Amino acid sequence: MGTDYSNEIKGFLKIHRDYFETGRTKDVDFRIEQLKRLKDAIQSYEGEIMEALHKDLRKPPFESFATEIGYVKDSIGYTLKHIRGWAKGQKVKTPMVHFGARSAIHPEPYGTVLIIAPWNYPFQLMIEPMIGAMAAGNCIVLKPSEYAPHVGKVMEKMIGECFDERYVRMIIGDRELATALVNSDFDYIFFTGSVLVGKIVMEAAAKHLIPVTLELGGKSPCIVDKHGNLAVAAERIIWGKFVNAGQTCVAPDYLLVHREVKEELMQRLIMTIRKFYGDNPASSPDYCRIINKKHLKRLVNLLEQEKIITGGNYDLDDLYMAPTLMDQVSWEDPVMADEIFGPILPIIPYDDLDDVIHRINQRPKPLALYLFTENREIQDLVMQRISFGGGCINDTLSHVASPYIPFGGVGASGIGAYHGKNSFDLFSHHKSIMRKTTKFSIPLAFPPYGERIHWLKKLMK
C-alpha cells in the first residue's frame, strides 16, 4: 500500500489558511521584505545551487547562472522595482447609466498556491512562479521534481531557513505525493511539465474548481527560409537546441529548411556543433547530461542510424547523448510523433511555405515557434497564420528571458502565462468594485417602470 498523505496535507493547508487569514501576506511591505529575503538567500546559496545543478544535470556554471540563478535574481529585482504600482487598485471608467458612481479594480491574492516544478530547470522553474505568487500576496507550497534530488535538497534547506513554514513550505516526495497534492483543496495550482501529466493535474483540479496554470510543451518548429542569414541561424539554432542537452520546453524541436539552402545550412550546423562543443562533446565542460537512464533510453529509441548526419553516439552510464542531427526525416517518423526533449534535431526540407504552415497547423499548437528570414512579408505571414505560445524571429529561446512579455502556451502547449507583471496578475484575483454616492439617487431602475424605457434606450445605446 502507498503512503496516505491526505491528513498531512489537510493539516498544513489549515495552517496556511490561518496564517493567510491574518492578512499579513497582503501587506505590500511584507511582500517586499520576503522577496528581498529570497534574493539574499539565493546569493548565499549560489555555490551550493550550482553544485547541485552540476550533480543532477552536469550543468556548466555559465548555464546554471544564465538560465537559473541569475535569471531569477534579475526577475526578483524587476518585481521589487514595480510591485507597489502593481498592487495598487486601478481606477477605471464608469458608464453614464451609473452616474454618481466610481469604479476600480483591486488585485488580491488567491490564498495558498501549489507550485509543482519539473526537473529540467529545477531551480528556475520553481522560483520564477514563486516570485509572482509572493508578489501577489499568496502563501505557497512548493513541490520539486524527485528526478533532480540534489537541487531539491538544497532548496529545501534554503526555503526552510528563509521562510516561516506557515507562509512558504517545500514538500519533497514522489509521484504519489504529487497526486495527493493536486487532489487537495488548494486555492491555485501552477504546474510545469508534460502534456500527459498536465491533463491529470487539470482533471484533479476540476473536481474542486481550482484554477490552474499549465506550462507544458509540444513540438516547437524552427523554420529557415531561403532569405535567412544562414551563418546567424546556424549558431542560434544550435545554441537553442543543445543548451541543457536539449532538455528545454521551448527548444527547437524540429527544423524546417527551404530546400535551396538546406545543404549549406546543414554544413554550418555541423561546423557550429564542433565550434561550440569540440570534436568530442562528451569531454566538453559546456555540455550537459540527460537527467536519467530512463529518459536516455527513450531518446535512443528515436534514433534512426541511416538518417544521422552527425552525433548519434551515447553512453548510458555517463547519461550522455551527443548533439545529433537527423536528415531526410519525414513527418511520419517516430522522432516526429512527440516532443523530443533531448539533443536530437530532425531536419525536414520544404519547397512550399504554405504546405509548411498547413502541416504545422494540423498538429497540436506548439509552445514556441522560431523563424529565420530577412523577408518581412514572410515574417508577417507566418506570425499571422500559425498559432503558438510565443517565439522569436531570427533567434531562439530569447523571448523567455524578457519580463516585458508573457510566457505561456496555447491549446495543448499550456494554459496561462507569466513572467514580470504577468506573474503578478496570474496569481491575483482582480476584484471589481463600484462605489456609489448616497448624496442623491436616480430611481430610473426601480419599479414601477412606467414609460421609463424611453429614457433607458437613450442611455444604453
Image (spheres, rainbow, N blue to C red):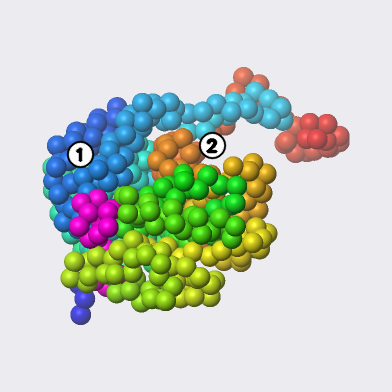
Q: Residue at x 44, y 50 (%)?
A: 234
From the viewer's perspective, tell me whether residue 409 is left or right of residue 286: right
Q: Position of residue 68 (x, y in %)?
A: 28, 45
Local packing at callout 2 (Cα closer than 10 Å; few below 14, some 14-19, many 20+) is: few
The residue closer to the viewer here, 400 or 252, is: 252
First in residue order: circle 1 vs circle 2: 1
Residue 439 visible in this rendered orientation of the protein: yes
Task: Check disc 1 and report its element: helix, strand or loop.
Answer: helix
Residue linked to disc 1: 42
The residue closer to the viewer here, 62 or 8, is: 62
The residue closer to the viewer here, 336 or 406, is: 336
Q: Position of residue 359 (x, y in %)?
A: 61, 65
**Residue segment shown in magenta:** 277-295
Q: Tell me, for residue 12, which label it has, or none.
A: none
Q: Residue at x 60, y 47 (%)?
A: 227
Q: Residue at x 65, y 47 (%)?
A: 378
Residue at the outermost bottom position: 1
Which amino acid, mark 1?
Answer: Ile
Q: Position of residue 262 (x, y in %)?
A: 53, 59
Q: CA distance from mark 1 to mark 2?
A: 36 Å
Residue linked to disc 2: 432
Residue 426 counted in the magenta span: no
The residue closer to the viewer here, 438 or 380, is: 380
Magenta-drawn stretch, dominant element (helix, strand or loop) = loop
